[in-house]
Image (cartoon, rainbow, N blue to C red):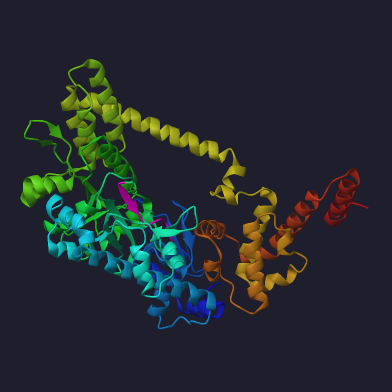
Amino acid sequence: MPIHQEFLDELNDRLNIVDVVSAYVPLKQRGANHWGLCPFHHEKTPSFSVNEAKQIFHCFGCGKGGGPIRFIMEMEGLSFPDAVRKLAGQVGLTVPEEDRGDSHWRERRRYILELNREAARFYRSMLARPDGEAVVSYIREKRRISPKFSAKFGLGAAPDAWDMLILAMADKGYEKADLIEAGLAVAGKNGGVYDKYRNRLMLPVIDVRGDVIGFTSRVMDDSIPKYLNTPETAIFKKRSILYGLNYAKSTKRHNFILVEGNIDVITLHQAGFDNTVATMGTALTEEHVRLLSRYTKELVLCYDNDAAGEDATQRAITLLRSSDMGVKVLRLPKHRTQDGELVKQDADDYIKNHGPGAFQDLMERSSNSVEYRLAALEGKLDLTRDDQRAQYLQEAAEVVASLSSPVEREIYGGRAAQRAGVTREAMADEVQRLRKRKHWKGQREVERRNLTPVRQLQPKERELRYVNVRSARAEEGILRIVLLDGAFFAQLDELTPEYFSSPLLGKAYRLLRQRWQEGRRLALAALDGEFTPQEMDHLSAVLQEPQPRNTAQLALADMKQTVLEERRREGIHSGADLTALRNELKQKKGYGG
């Protein structure tokens, strides 16, 4: 582990998970647990539980769980070391820098960030040289970005040369291997190394801390790819990056605007919409949604007004249903050229063609996600034709049926009925039918799961599935009992981790046993850094099952025996082995000779 266990133990001893979680989630105590609405998925009935005695949280809805450190990792999007540092600062502790591995990783990260900053300065300096004239012209004339905002976003130029960046960085002490690691250079098939970005507009990607974590770029000629990003590295992960968030987080506006392009972000900021961000050429992800929800309660989707933009909007709306953000959609009208042709336009085009005031009008007239979906549905069908009108009614009813609020169902159902020329009652009947069918299907799924208990006992993640459910259930029980009181380990001398059928449960048993032997406090929260998030989710779920202390002694003996028996069964390869096992079981159960 990168951070010494002694320090982690002291940190966990000083933390109270109720206090940690309460800073983000309102909690109410019911019985032994505190309950609240899960911050990791959308819900209306609290299924998020915090157990003060066990110092763990667990959501019975989405399955996330763990200790205080895991909670901060999920809420803040931090690595394990960064979450530890954040919590340590809150309780007045300083993380020791003794571990060489951790120190090396952080030093390397700082080194790459400094290299990125130097590269950004190099690209910026190219704008004042002949090598950057084409990019300067593109910025000022094509994109109409002012010198002020060009400087604010650090725009630069990659020269049309093979190794100018490599040579410039070598003068500052950086080696080719450093540039390859940072994604600034690539190795050729012949063994040579050359600049990754050539003849391109360069846009540094800056995180909320002000660090340059990578670059995005646009080519200045007809070569491909047109847009090129830093490859995935330890510090550049597109699934969780929002371009422009370093400025948007300080906006005074009440919402955020999400656009598709990086240039769109700069154009809108220049036009006064400093609440604009963009993904890095990827579809919206759950990580993006969690990040956005930390800074705003309303998100306006402003994607391109072509088929791809419509599809991206629909996918984003589906994903955003699980968030607590309000969602609106700004529909950009198509632009009519001088020849009278209607062409698509993005946010950058619209600002140039119509100005900030017109864009603000569109913002104020933006529709909520339900209105958008109904309008999009209407736009693709001809409601003068009976067959397409019937299709509209069916698909519109599905949209309305998905709404949880009866008031919203009545309002939007009425609007859809009016557009299709049917009665409100007919639409209401169809919506009710769909809701009953969905409820019925849900009930059948619950019944089906209840009739397959083995499946119910399995972890959600396929890679954690049990190969021997009977043994694994006993192994789970053993973990619950030893966490009640480590003294129970004294009765488990012959039960080593190798006897466990589940590698995950065996690892947890080994680590807890080691802590008991070393005289350390036993708690699942103390193991936060030893397991993946998915593994901690499952372990926290295991600990939710009750284990009365007064029956623990007898239960432990039975569970231990089950694990040993199942291990013996795995070793049966002949009739003699089976006979020996049967005789042994008879003697232990007291009904043999």
Q: Horizontally, is 503 left or right of 296 in the view?
A: right
Magenta-highlighted residues:
226-233
Out of 413 and 504, give the one closest to the viewer.
Answer: 504
Residue found 36% across the figure and 68% down from its top:
167
Q: Horizontally, is 505 left or right of 31 in the view?
A: right
Whether residue 245 is visible, yes or no, is: yes
Q: Horizontally, is 159 left or right of 363 in the view?
A: right
Find residue 330 and report its image quarter.
top left
- Residue 324 percent coordinates (x, y): 29, 53
Considering every residue shown, the one lying at the far top of the view is 386
Q: Number of labelled discs?
A: 0
Find residue 233 and report its image quarter.
bottom left
Out of 223 and 250, give the one closest to the viewer.
Answer: 223
Residue found 16% across the figure and 58% down from its top:
269
- Residue 462 percent coordinates (x, y): 56, 47
Magenta stretch: helix, strand or loop mostly? loop
Find residue 303 and report its image quarter.
top left
Residue found 20% across the figure and 29% down from its top:
379
- Residue 227 within the magenta-colored segment of the rendering: yes
- Residue 138 percent coordinates (x, y): 17, 53
Whether residue 255 is visible, yes or no, is: no
Quadrant assignment for the N terminus: bottom right
Identify whether 377 is placed above or below 153.
Answer: above
Out of 406 and 517, give the one closest to the viewer.
Answer: 517
- Residue 202 percent coordinates (x, y): 27, 58
- Residue 322 within the magenta-colored segment of the rendering: no
Residue found 69% across the figure and 70% down from its top:
488
Out of 152 and 465, give the one closest to the viewer.
Answer: 152
